[in-house]
Amino acid sequence: MSERPRLGVFKFASCDGCQLALLDAEDQLLQLAGAVRIAYFLEASSRIEPGPYDIALVEGSITTPADAERIQQIRRDAKFLVTIGACATAGGIQALRNWSDTDEFLRAVYARPEYISTLATSTAIADHVRVDFELRGCPINQQQLIEVLQSLLAGRRPRTPTHSICLDCKRRGTVCVMVAAGTPCLGPVTQAGCGAICPAYDRGCYGCYGPAVQANLASLTTHLIAKGEAREKVVYRLRGFNGYSPEFRAESDRLESIEEREG
Amino acid sequence: MPNENAAVSKRLPDSDGNPQQSHFVATEAFASIFEVLQGKGYTVIGPTIDQHAIVYDQVRSLQDLPQGWTDRQGAGEYRLERRDDNALFGYVVGPHSWKHFLFPPAMTVATADKTASGWTFQTPEDDPPKYAFLGVRACELAAMRVQDRVFMAGPYVDPAYHQRRSGALIIAVNCSQAAPTCFCTSMGTGPQCTSGFDLALTELTDGFVIAAATRDGEEILSELKSRPATVEELRQAAAVTQRAAEQVERRLDTTNIRDVLFANLDHPRWDDVAQRCLSCANCTMVCPTCFCSSVQEVSDLSGQHVERQRQWDSCFNFDFSYMNGGVIRDTTRSRYRQWLTHKLASWIDQFGSSGCVGCGRCIAWCPVGIDLTEEVAAIREPTS
């Protein structure tokens, strides 16, 4: 048994949805449990084994001083560290605080703000430690997670596409919601992985999988604004689950700075 | 006119080599074509309304067709609109093309299983339906000819495409109108359907002028209630196509286009278009001739079962040009240039015709409305 790679699953600031994607892999869970030794996975088992771990899956973003410490130890304990989901990879929806005054939130929400120990920002794991592979998505795609684990077991590079959502819409025969219905959509600048779900249900893409490789955000936002969407709304559109990814962040900041300049 | 060397062999002209006499089929009688086709074992694919557009999908009766609807198209824009008549084919081409059925977006081309005695390899059963394509436009016939050359003309015939294509019955429709995105007249592909079909229809107010070009087509026509078309009906049919031709406003100047593009690989317009291009791959996906795919081996967790899967891919994808340790077209500029110069220039060297049939899909379905005819015109402008 000892030859099986040891897997640890760790949680930071997050909703647990990405870990659930692993637990939800019902058909493959037993097979997976046979292929790896689950050594640390609080959501699944209270049995905790100490490190080192061959593979560490890390969910969530860094939002507290304690977590900023804890991730260092996990990195030291992990041979191969994979971040799973938008929180771990881009700071998550909670990274909206990065554009706000955290102290103001504390005063507004908590009766005794001094009991709260938090950082002013929510940041990606890669901002704190070296990350070996980032698996995108809010939540992650279960098949992609299996693919990543499988590739690690087989000693090859994970195959997770970096192209736009549009390609997947076309493969499944979904008509472009932007062209045919004028629905604003982040699909052309968002990385595939979800299977292009939202446009198939007549909604624009929310950008859950973060920026596609070399995404041309300025072209898309210029077009959305030309088609009548307020610049402020385009900023909100970009500041979603992956709003603090470098590309989406730079573009929303750029649009906001135009707003401020033009008053 | 692109050359037409790769027609499917079963599609012979009638014994005299002349087009058959045209018949008139009233709309009510035309409705029975669905039963006739179904009776012959065809799965009928045709235009129907879905997702705010006229798409190609299975159609079972006249009621499934977009009767009384039309489309309004422009760069990056498509809208369905009501017509003031009950025309069945009163629109142009939409987001889908027939390649979706001839060259499926995803398929498993091989499997392998690890057994006690080693790996066993299998080719999965491929048992596609026998398709009848209803409502194929002239530019789409041209696109099929282009893909026929790609998939069937060389020494390596694509079995999946070949099987679907050679079994398919083609019922063409002459366009009665053109969209602002259409430029078939520049590419010599339309709007008149001239070859590559079993039956060709021209829609008049109360029925169709129909001509058969193959024995399969003749046989189907003989099962519809028809009579020889009158001189007046033939005149009206010619006027329908003439009107569509006259409505085509967009132009792509193809004069010497191969040499012009190759002589302008460093034109500043490539930088300009790269500022706008999303590199999202939509143009290549809607293009009825784009044929790129990628193949990968996918195994299950146990590593005992492996599938070789092929799916549509695009030259606009960053990873598509990954080879030997690196990506060779690593900017949007280089990818847009690759697409346009392949489509309009190197395609001619490779396959003996342009890769563009003038359907205008890449213009309409580009989310930001990039128009290749405009880009080519700009590249033709001398740089200062």
Image (cartoon, coloured by chain):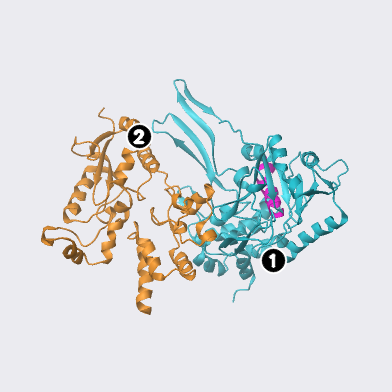
Q: What kind of residue is marked 2?
A: Glu
Image height of B332 relative to A161, above or below: below
A14 and B276: which one is in front?
A: A14
Chain A: give its colour: orange
Place of residue B216 in the rendered image (x, y in percent of width and height, measured from the top left): 77, 39
Q: Which residue is under mark 2?
A: A26
Q: What secondary structure characterizes most of the magenta part?
A: helix
Place of residue A104 in the rendered image (x, y in percent of width and height, measured from the top left): 19, 67
Q: Quadrant of the C terminus of chain B?
A: bottom right
| Apparent side of residue A84 relative to residue B2 in the rendered image (left or right) | left
Give the crowd class for mark 2: few <14, some 14-19, many >=20 residues within 10 Å: few
Query: What chain letter is assigned to the residue under label 2?
Result: A
Q: Which residue is under mark 1?
A: B253
Query: What chain letter is assigned to the residue under label 1?
Result: B
Give the crowd class for mark 1: few <14, some 14-19, many >=20 residues within 10 Å: few
A250 and A27: which one is in front?
A: A27
Q: What kind of residue is marked 1?
A: Asp
* Quarter of image, res B185: bottom right
C-alpha gap between disc 2 and disc 1:
58 Å
Image height of B349 relative to A182, above or below: above
Image height of B77 relative to A156, above or below: below
Place of residue B42 in the rendered image (x, y in percent of width and height, measured from the top left): 68, 37
On residue B160, which mark appears? none
- Label 2, secondary structure: give it: helix
